[in-house]
Image (cartoon, helix red, strand yellow):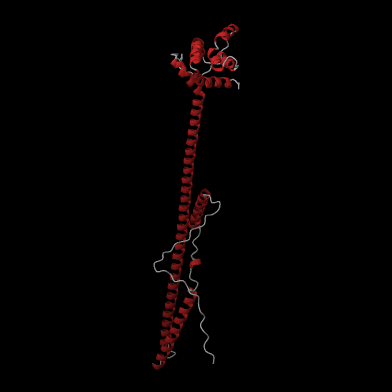
Amino acid sequence: MAGPAPAPTMAAQPTAQPNATYQPAPMAPQPGFNVNQAAAGALQGAIGGTQRAMQAPLQVGAYANPYTSAVIDRTQQDIERQRQMAMNTLGAQATAANAFGGSRQGVAEGVMAGEYGRMAGDMAAQQRQQNYSQALQAAMSDRQARLGAASQMGQLGQQAFGTSQAIQQQQAQQGLLQQGIQQALIDAARQQYAGYTGAPAQSLQAPLSALGIAQQGGASTTTQSQSPGLLNYLQVIGQMCWVAREVYGEDDPKWMQFREWVIGYSPNWFYNAYSKYGEKVAKVVAKMPALKLVIRPFMDAKRKAMGYK
C-alpha cells in the first residue's frame, strides 16, 4: 500500500517583529485638489447627514433579530411538550385514584392548561420585548454613529477652510514681500538715474567753487526756457562762448551747440553765472587744461539732451 501523501509545503511566512509599530502608508495627493471646494463639500455633507439622522424615521424593525421567531417557536414547542407530559402524569394519577374522566380530572387539566398557556405567553412576550429593546438600542446607536460621522465631516470641513485661509494669508504676505522688493528696486533705479543726470552739474560745481562762484538762488534742477530777443542773441554771440570755445576749440562746432543750450534752455542761475564769470573761468581752463576733462562731460550731456551727437 502506498504511504500517505506528503503534506503540502507552505511558503515561509515573514515573522512579525515583536516590537514593530504600525505605520500607515501615506495617502497619495489627489490631482487638482481644492481646499475651498473640499471645505464646502464637507460642510454640505455634514448638514445633509445631520438632517437625515434627525428627521428620518427610526426604522427599529430593520435592526430586529430575524431569528427571534424561530426561538419563540422552539420555546413554545418545548412548553407544549412539557404540558403534554404533565397531562399524562395527571391522567395516570386520576386513574390510580379511580377519578379518570371525572370532573375533578377535568378541572385539574383545565387549570394545568391555563398555567402552561400563561407561561408560554409570558415567555413569548419577554422574548419579543427583549428583541425590540435590542433593536431600538441598535437603531439609536446607529443614529448616534451617523451624527458623529456628520460632526467629524464638519470638523474636516472646518480644518480645510482653515487651511485655505492660511494659504491665502501666505500668498498675501508673499505678494506684499514681492511688492516691497519691486518698490525698492524702483527707488534704487530712480536714485541711480537722478545721480546720473545730476553728475554733470555736480562736476561743474568743483571749478566754480574753486573760482569762488556761488550758485545763485539755491540748487534747482528745473530748466526754464528763455526766449531772448534778436539784440540779446547778437550780444551773446560775441560774449557767451568763452568756456565752450576753450573746452572744444574754436574749430569744433560743439561749442556753438552748447551755447544754444545756455541761451535757450539753461536755468536762470546758470545763465547769470555764465554771463558773469564765463570769461574768467575760460582763462582758468586755458591755464589748467585738466579742467576740460571735468567740464566737457557736462557740456556733452546738455548737447545730447537737445538731440546733438
Residue that appears at 54% across and 19% down? 299
Percent position of residue 294, x then y:
50, 21
Q: Is residue 133 above or below residue 158?
A: below
Report the side of 181 relative to 235 (left or right): left
Question: Please, which residue is most extreme toward the top here?
Answer: 231
**Viewer-nearest residue: 206 or 32:** 206
Relative to residue 256, is residue 15 drawn left or right? left
Task: Tell me the quadrant of the picture where the C terminus can be found.
Answer: top right
Q: Can residue 184 be seen in this view?
A: yes
Which part of the image, by quadrant, shows the N terminus? bottom right
| Relative height, residue 18 to residue 92 (above, below) | above
Residue 67: percent from the left, percent from the top? 49, 74
Q: In this view, does 194 lie above or below 38?
A: above
Tell me where residue 61 appears, x and y as whole percent: 50, 66
> Where does the image place residue 49, in percent across and percent down from the top left?
50, 56
Looking at this view, is 220 or 123 the one in front?
220
- Residue 221 seen in the current view: no
Q: Out of 109 and 88, give the one closest to the viewer.
A: 88
Image mark count: 0
The residue nearer to you, when weighing 110 against 24, is: 24
Q: Residue at x 46, y 46 (%)?
A: 166
Q: Residue at x 47, y 81 (%)?
A: 77
Q: For the point 46% across and 51% down, which residue is it?
A: 159
